[in-house]
Image (cartoon, rainbow, N blue to C red):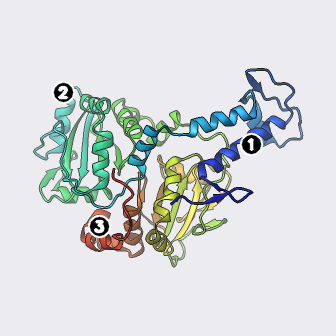
């Protein structure tokens, strides 16, 4: 069910349509602010009114808009409309039913057969001229593991890139076999997953040419983001820049950094006084970092956050929604610092939107969801945090495994939304 938004005449508007109308109105305002001529095929906007607010003047300077506002809006409509194939792919990537599946947890034949000495595996990969090693944590019946296998690791170009640059060792997150980590420490696979905070499956841990851990991806990501992660490690960018900054080079901030996000009555209103460092809070905290024109954010609001059980569990939290590009709104963070949302997002090294970060009553981060998420995973995390189950089960997957039957029953009445 899509979150409803209504126009002036009461008609239903999809969130993307609301955002496009907002962009259209801003563009129309820009055109009316002192333009002196229009030359086909482009309009060069020149601001003459020196009394016009400085922030808006900077936005308008040098902008190039299409010949007419109507044709510009038509272009926006065209670009925002998915083809049937794109729509189907979007549903598979973001809108699948994430309840347990019949997936058996197997690995592709090109995964490396390992004796579970990851240090030796890494050395062998480097000796063979590769860029490093990927340790893959998965499990049977995992909808997100099924998704990464079917949507990402079935694409010939992506598979070719992985095989050329990395060896991949596949592990079952619940396995109690002994392994040796790249740093030489010996433990079981399960203990290693706890140490690496593999809260979600799949989790991919990348080790680079310097034998250091370069990046960890917890959860399922669209193919383009996984490809970016592979290139980030293979080309050695992790040695000089964060993954967040690396992605920002190809995906710069939005044109209007104060565009509104999708509202929800469960969200708290400013001021964002989230400090818990002095006095414990009565509820845990969920902070949702989003950005404008974010399809995954739209899906979060229109699908998992519309699930009745998810909404019921969200009421056990204080919930704050922040724009990762907001450079003005003051936030008193859970540990008592005064930052803007943009500064806080950078400090947390967030690279995916939406990211949901969960804090306990004393302001300590419990875990975060910074990958594709649907109702079953989100609902489980909310219960895990609200009940402080992390005190007994340091890994979400451990708790989920122990409570699998009751969680399945809790969500059993929900109709299926499709399969990954």
- The residue depicted at 54 percent of the width and 58 percent of the height is 2
Please state the horizontal and vertical placement of residue 355, each as a whole percent of the image.
Answer: 48, 54
Front disc: 1 or 2? 1
The label on residue 26 is 1
Q: Residues within 10 Å of mark 2 (few under 14, many from 20)?
A: few
Give the camera-side residue of 208 and 51: 51
Q: Residue furthest left?
A: 115
Residue 242 seen in the figure: no
Residue 30 to residue 141: above or below: above
- Look at the numbered discs 3 and 2 and tell me whether their residues touch, using CB distance below 8 Å: no
Neighbor class of circle 3 (other Cα within 10 Å; few <14, some 14-19, many 20+) is some
Which mark sits nearer the N-terminus, 3 or 2? 2
Seen at 89% across and 41% down, the residue is 51
Residue named by callout 2: 128
Q: Which residue is mark 3?
A: 400
Sooner in the amino-acid sequence: mark 1 or mark 2: 1
Q: Nearer the viewer, residue 417 or 334?
A: 417
- Please report whichever mark, 3 or 1, sits nearer to the chain's N-terminal start: 1
Residue depicted at x 45% and y 70%:
360
Q: Residues within 10 Å of mark 1 (few under 14, many from 20)?
A: some
The location of residue 358, given as percent across then percent down, is 46, 64
In the shown orientation, is residue 313 left or right of residue 227? right
Question: Residue at point 84% right, 37% down?
Answer: 32
Q: Do callouts 3 and 1 mark residues in contact (Cβ within 8 Å)?
A: no
């Amino acid at each position: 069910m899509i979150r409803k938004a209504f126009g002036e005449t009461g008609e239903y508007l999809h969130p993307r349509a609301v955002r496009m109308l907002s962009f259209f109105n801003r563009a129309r305002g820009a055109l009316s602010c002192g333009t002196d001529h229009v030359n086909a095929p482009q309009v060069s906007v020149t601001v003459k009114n020196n009394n016009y607010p400085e922030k808006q003047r900077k936005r308008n300077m040098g902008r190039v808009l299409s010949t007419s506002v109507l044709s510009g809006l038509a272009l926006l409509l065209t670009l925002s409309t998915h083809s049937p194939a794109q729509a189907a792919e979007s549903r598979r990537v973001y809108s699948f039913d994430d309840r347990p599946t019949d997936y058996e947890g197997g690995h592709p034949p090109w995964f490396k057969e390992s004796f579970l000495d990851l240090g030796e595996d890494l050395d062998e990969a480097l000796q063979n001229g590769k860029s490093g090693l990927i340790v893959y944590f998965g499990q049977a019946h995992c909808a997100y593991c099924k998704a990464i296998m079917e949507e990402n690791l079935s694409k010939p170009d992506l598979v070719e890139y992985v095989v050329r640059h990395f060896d991949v060792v596949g592990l079952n997150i619940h396995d109690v076999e002994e392994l040796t980590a790249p740093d030489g420490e010996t433990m079981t696979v399960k203990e290693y997953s706890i140490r690496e905070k593999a809260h979600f499956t799949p989790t991919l841990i990348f080790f680079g040419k310097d034998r250091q851990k370069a990046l960890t991806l917890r959860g399922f990501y669209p193919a383009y983001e996984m490809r970016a992660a592979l290139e980030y490690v293979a080309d050695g960018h992790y040695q000089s820049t964060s993954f967040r900054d690396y992605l920002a080079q190809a995906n710069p901030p939005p044109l209007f950094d104060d565009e509104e996000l999708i509202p929800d009555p469960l969200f708290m209103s400013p001021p964002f006084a989230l400090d818990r460092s002095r006095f414990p809070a009565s509820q845990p905290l969920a902070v949702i970092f989003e950005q404008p024109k974010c399809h995954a954010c739209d899906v979060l609001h229109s699908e998992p956050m519309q699930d009745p059980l998810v909404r019921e569990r969200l009421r056990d939290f204080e919930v704050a929604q922040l724009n990762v590009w907001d450079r003005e709104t003051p936030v008193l963070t859970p540990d008592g610092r005064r930052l803007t949302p943009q500064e806080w997002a950078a400090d947390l090294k967030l690279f995916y939107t939406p990211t949901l970060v969960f804090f306990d009553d004393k302001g300590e981060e419990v875990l975060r969801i910074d990958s594709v998420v649907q109702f079953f995973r989100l609902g489980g995390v909310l219960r895990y945090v609200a009940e402080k189950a992390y005190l007994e089960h340091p890994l979400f997957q451990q708790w989920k495994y122990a409570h699998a039957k009751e969680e399945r029953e809790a969500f059993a009445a929900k109709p299926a939304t499709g399969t990954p």
